[in-house]
Image (cartoon, grey):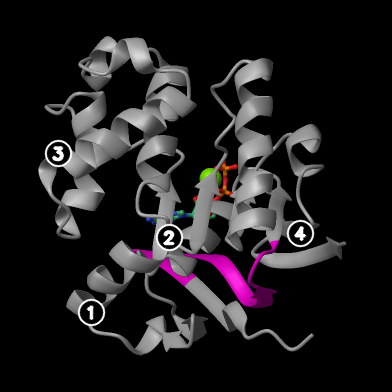
Amino acid sequence: MDAPAAIRLSNVTKVYRQGVNEVRALDSLSLTLPAQHFVAVMGASGSGKSTLLHIAAGLARVTSGEVVVHDQTLSAMADDDLTRFRRKHIGLIFQSFNLLPTLNAIENVALPLIINGAKLNVARAKAKDLLALVGLSDRLAHRPDELSGGQQQRVAIARALINEAPLLLADEPTGNLDSHTGEDLLQRLRALATEQHRTIIMVTHDQRAASYADQVIRLQDGKIVTSAE
Ligand SMILES: Nc1ncnc2c1ncn2[C@@H]1O[C@H](COP(=O)(O)OP(=O)(O)OP(=O)(O)O)[C@@H](O)[C@H]1O
Ligand SMILES: [Mg+2]
């Protein structure tokens, strides 16, 4: 089958500079993923996992190399175009949840859809459904500082799903969840890839979480050291 790649990273290097110090967070990394593929990224702290997701999302610029998502070359796009592209094509679950502190759960989840032009009542209804899905129907009006860490994570997951973006990037999405809730989420991610043709890149430290993926990639010092199907 010759399906077009959902995402292609070619020789991507990311160097962070702080004064005279340089950190090579990604080092000539190449990776091509088809649609409907669920990949787990593992590796020690500092190996470049979050950097890889930020680059894939166009949130960070490459130092050299090329990033292509759905035939669009992110590394060549202007910031405005990149932001617009991201809103339609990419769902993101950050390691720190990045919820807006002044908005309650339902408003946080509905926001990406409203930004994309959906009607308020439509966005709120969908946000409510997604919050039910992650078990938070009884916390719709709670702000982030009124939610536990695992609950905030679940709000962030619902927010990442609301736009039905074809590429989903998740940075340790089960890190703050109990095993039952974590398992639910992993099954849902698995179903999104298989049934809805989403491409998912999930960073995890948990072997059990990684076992839901089609492929496990291991990073070390910004390089892929093993890639097992
Ligand atoms: N904004 C930044 N400025 C400078 N250095 C950075 C920056 N972001 C990340 N780094 C460095 O790049 C390297 C890779 O960081 P990254 O966050 O990708 O690691 P990670 O694999 O996600 O680790 P963890 O498992 O702890 O989340 C680290 O050595 C980190 O210190
Ligand atoms: Mg990280």
The range drawn in magenta is 15-37
Q: Residue tagged by mark 2? A: 165
Q: Nearer the viewer, mark 4 or mark 2?
A: 2
Q: Quadrant of the N terminus?
A: bottom right
Q: Of helix, strand and loop, which one carries label 1? A: helix
Residue at point 42% right, 23% down? 132
Could you say which quadrant of the image residue 125 lies in? top left
Q: Is mark 4 within 8 Å of ligand 1?
A: no
Q: CA distance from mark 2 to mark 1?
A: 16 Å
Q: Amino acid at mark 4?
A: Ile
In depth, the one of 20 and 43 nearer the eye is: 43
Q: Is mark 1 within 8 Å of ligand 1?
A: no
Residue 13, position in %: x, y?
54, 77
Which residue corresponds to mark 4?
217
Q: Residue at x 37, y 74 (%)?
A: 61
What label does residue 81 carry, if any? 1
Q: Residue 208's spot in the image, x, y percent?
A: 80, 33
Q: CA distance from mark 4 to mark 2?
A: 22 Å
